[in-house]
Image (tube, helix red, strand yellow):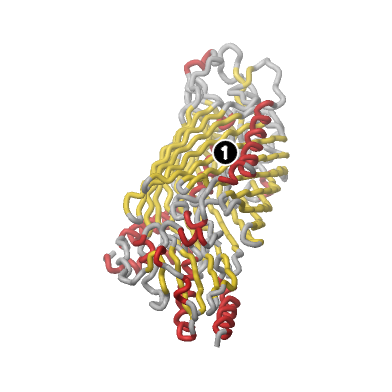
Amino acid sequence: MRRREVAMVLAMLAVGAAAGGCASMGVQPWERDVLSQPGMTPGEDIVTSALDEHIYFSKEASTGGLGSGGGGCGCN
Amino acid sequence: MAATDGKASLRAALAAACGALGVAGAPAQATEVRTGVLGYTEPGRVSALELVGDAKHTFAGGQAATFRFVYDVLSGSSANGGVPAAAAQTFTSPSGRGSYTTEAGATPLDGTFRDTRFAGSAGMTLPWGRLTSATLGLYGSSEHDYTSLGANAALTREFNRKNTTVTLRAARYEDSVSPEGGAPAALSAMLPATGGGGDDDKLGPDKDDDDNGGDSLAKSVTDLGLSVTQVLGRRTLLTLNYTNSRVAGYQTDPYKLLTVVDPVSGAPRAADAYLFESRPDRRLKHAVAGELLRHLGRDVMTLSYRYFDDDWGVTSHTAELAWRANVAAKQYLQPNVRWYHQTAADFYRRWLVDGQALPEHASADYRLGDMTAMTYGLKYGRTLATGNEVSLRVEYYAQTGESHPAEAFGDLRDLDLFPTVDAWIVNFGYTFGK
Amino acid sequence: MFPFRIRPALAGLVLLLAAASARAGDPAPAAATRAVVPAADFELASYQGRVVVLDFWASWCKPCRQSLPWLSDLQRRHGEKGLQVVAVSVDADEAAMRERLGDIDPGIVVVFDPEGVLAQQYKLEVMPTSFLVDRAGKARGSHRGFMAKEADRREVEIVALLEEGR
């Protein structure tokens, strides 16, 4: 199915970007002040996300999305 | 309540809340507890109340243990799949004993819907050096007709001075469905009620399993995921995510029906007008999602998009924008808008036509149909002097579809075949020990 | 419409909201008059003869909320034996840094490095990071991150350096 291939290509692009192109991007460890602020960590409000996912899961035909990590303080 | 009693009463209220949530005792220094209460109501249809407690304890060595439980109560009416008709319609309740009647012109709603669900999960994150960590977890949930057990694992690795985070994820769930009144055969006719009273057959956890006809059907779900988070700059972060989910086993909704209509009048046929739906027992889903976080002056903008596609023919797009306005030092207001659009599954049928051959699979569940949904929300959050956080969120959710599709004929042309489903959501959150 | 169990939960919610609003108000700002060395004026050499723990931290760094009090305690207990803790803040905002200085030992030298000049010089890889310098001014190792379970072992290392020059 064509749509599935599109999805696969997108996913591979994401990995490729992370592995290669992104090596030069980013900030120094001491420049993460803004990234440490509330709201700048993906998936920060886990309880709200869980509640939302449950609602949408029971009302819509789609699942999956944004489980993630990264961002934030980047400490230790 | 006197203002000077604020602190004491907060403690008391919190203690009461914790007692109710099963998180007894004072939290240790390295324990973060998030709690939430959510009320959900679709006027005239379903109401639900959901309680969530999530605790994370971080040990001195950097390991973290997480526990979560969710409890929810659901009751009210939900669309049974049948189309409205020019005359009143009578349906048999899922138990097979009672019946309910839908007025002329109204969307058939099964009002016997009632359930409680309890779900719990536990996980352990084990760091391996400064850049790698592994998470292992277990999950279980139970409803009166549904049980799910799962295990999950994730591996996270940081690169480029922690500017790139890659997570690989796998999960497996084994579910078991024991439909009320037994699992109906695919596209078999709804039988007339066997009597024994119309209203004493509410579904509930107190129901004896014997009433389920002894059927227990299995379903397994295998999820695989990959996510990459990249810091793009001092104020910008991007996350990309791919998830693949393979479902095998019983996926039919045993309580959903299809109306077989007369080919000319569009009215339910005289005999055996309602058939139980049937869905394929395999489904492969893909989702690609991206989320951009951008800090703007004092605000944070979150923009996300998801593309979803499965082999049932459903394709969907989801876009969401949230704007966290830090209105004061420790307070924020966050409006959000979400747009969702899906195409129908290949086997979605609003109705079946009398005299035509039955398809292998068919469902009139509007959740598998062409649909657009909008969510508008507003959240207020504040950090208290204690460092604890409170938030209150109100959301409005509306699902719309084609009320008068081109294929409608006879009586069906004059009926609303996709009434807008709307819901109000109120969500209170409290986080402490952060 | 709601099942009976919802009532106590709703009452609890109202109670929580009422209590939360009664607690409104921000804490008083920490006293912030302490002397702080600008990064440009900092010279490690001027501490020769003492064992130096040069620690990079920031107000926004979570593990630093544990490491700074620990360093403060070390300074208090070993300062007389020749320990000098230098706490280099890479905060961009001086007020945010000063908010954290309220409880730390006055013997600690605080350096303000908003541009990360020193951080760059020391090729910092993670927050927080500590560098150990002996009495002769020689680098004797570094430690990345902060874990409570490693604190005792690190103190032993520092005490050993303090003993060396006697």
Q: Nearer the viewer, residue B349 or B372?
A: B372
Give the position of the N terminus of chain A as an image quadrant: top right
Chain letter of mark 1 equals B
| In the rendered image, the vertical position of residue B420 relative to residue A49, given as above or below | above
Position of residue B310 measured from the top left corner of the image (x, y, whole percent): 65, 32
| In the rendered image, the vertical position of residue B1 relative to residue B306, given as above or below | below
Q: Nearer the viewer, residue B421 or B231?
A: B231
Asked whether, in this view, residue C137 is left or right of residue B186, the answer is: left
Could you tell me the amino acid type at mark 1? Ala
Residue shown at 63% from the left, 36% from the top: A13
Q: Which residue is mark 1?
A: B289
- Where disc 1 sits, the SS reads strand
Asked whether, in this view, residue C66 is left or right of residue B3, the answer is: right
**Callout count:** 1
Q: Residues within 10 Å of mark 1 (few under 14, many from 20)?
A: many
Q: Quadrant of residue B350?
A: top right
Position of residue C95 measured from the top left corner of the image (x, y, whole percent): 34, 62
Give the position of the C terminus of chain A as an image quadrant: bottom right
In this view, which residue lies farthest toward the top?
A: B264
Q: Nearer the viewer, residue A12 or B117?
A: A12
Residue shown at 54% from the left, 60% from the top: C123
Position of residue B370 measured from the top left corner of the image (x, y, whole percent): 55, 26
Asked whether, in this view, residue B427 is left or right of residue B56, the answer is: left
Q: Is residue B73 visible?
A: no
Position of residue C56 measured from the top left corner of the image (x, y, whole percent): 48, 65
